[in-house]
Amino acid sequence: MQRLYHSARFIRETIVPLLASRTVAHPEPILAIDEGLNDRRYVDPMLRRLVANGTVSQAVPLWYQLRVLSDGSRISAAGGATALPLLLPDIGRVERGTFWPDERVVAMLIAHFLTSDKLILLTQNTRNDLHGIRRILQTEVGPTLNELVPMRLGLLALVQKPGTSLSSYCASVEHWIMTKEVDAGFLWQVVSE
């Protein structure tokens, strides 16, 4: 499979030139959520608290979901169906066989450097597959962020350790975000209880 997005080149050729003319757009980081953490019971309340208290500037989904409505028409919904019930009476069903590739997740993530110097990624994805989130971040995005002079952009990946309950992960993530800063550069942090 050929890659469609080149994350390191996007950072160097698009984000870095923008930084020369931009002050910090959001002093608080943007919190970005991968599809595996699409959860209303634990994740959504944590996100609402962190945004409401100003710890993060916003919480954004990093995927789109193709949905089929009862009349057969299709819609593409950011973050799945979480926000749709308020907007549409018919949120449809997920179209089978569609998926949002990891490289698109990373592309959507780093695009947020256009408006913020600090990003936090929440993900369950610990696999190290060829075109996966972890591999792209650790081999392309991370080294690029770490070599920038001056070091200004920061990406913190808070990764759910396999076997850790979602409630424990969310409690640990919320504590981490409330008590620590996002440093410049890249950090892949596995979070357990």
Image (cartoon, rainbow, N blue to C red):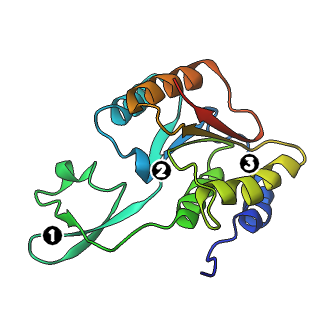
Name above or below for residue 45 compared with residue 185. Answer: above
**Distance (Cα) linking label 2 and label 3:** 28 Å
Identify residue type, mark 1: Leu
Looking at the image, tell me whether mark 2 or mark 3 is earlier in sequence order: 3
* Cβ atoms at labels 2 and 1 below 8 Å apart: no
Side of 94 where 103 appears, left or right: right
* Cβ atoms at labels 2 and 3 below 8 Å apart: no
Q: Nearer the viewer, mark 2 or mark 1?
A: 2
Looking at the image, tell me whether mark 3 or mark 1 is earlier in sequence order: 3
Side of 8 where 59 appears, left or right: left
Report which residue position mark 2 lands on: 34
Q: Nearer the viewer, mark 3 or mark 1?
A: 1
Q: Residue at x 54, y 65 (%)?
A: 104
User: Badge 2: few (under 14), some or many (20 or more) residues near its Cα, within 10 Å?
Assistant: many
* Element type where label 2 sits in the image: loop
Q: Nearer the viewer, mark 2 or mark 3?
A: 2
Which quadrant of the figure contains the N terminus? bottom right
Q: Quadrant of residue 139?
A: bottom right
Identify residue type, mark 3: Arg
Report which residue position mark 1 lands on: 69
Residue 27 at what x, y percent from top left? 64, 33
Residue 22 circle label:
3
Residue 16 visible somewhere in the drawing: yes
**Distance (Cα) linking label 3 and label 1:** 42 Å
Q: Residue at x 64, y 57 (%)?
A: 128
Q: Residue at x 54, y 63 (%)?
A: 102
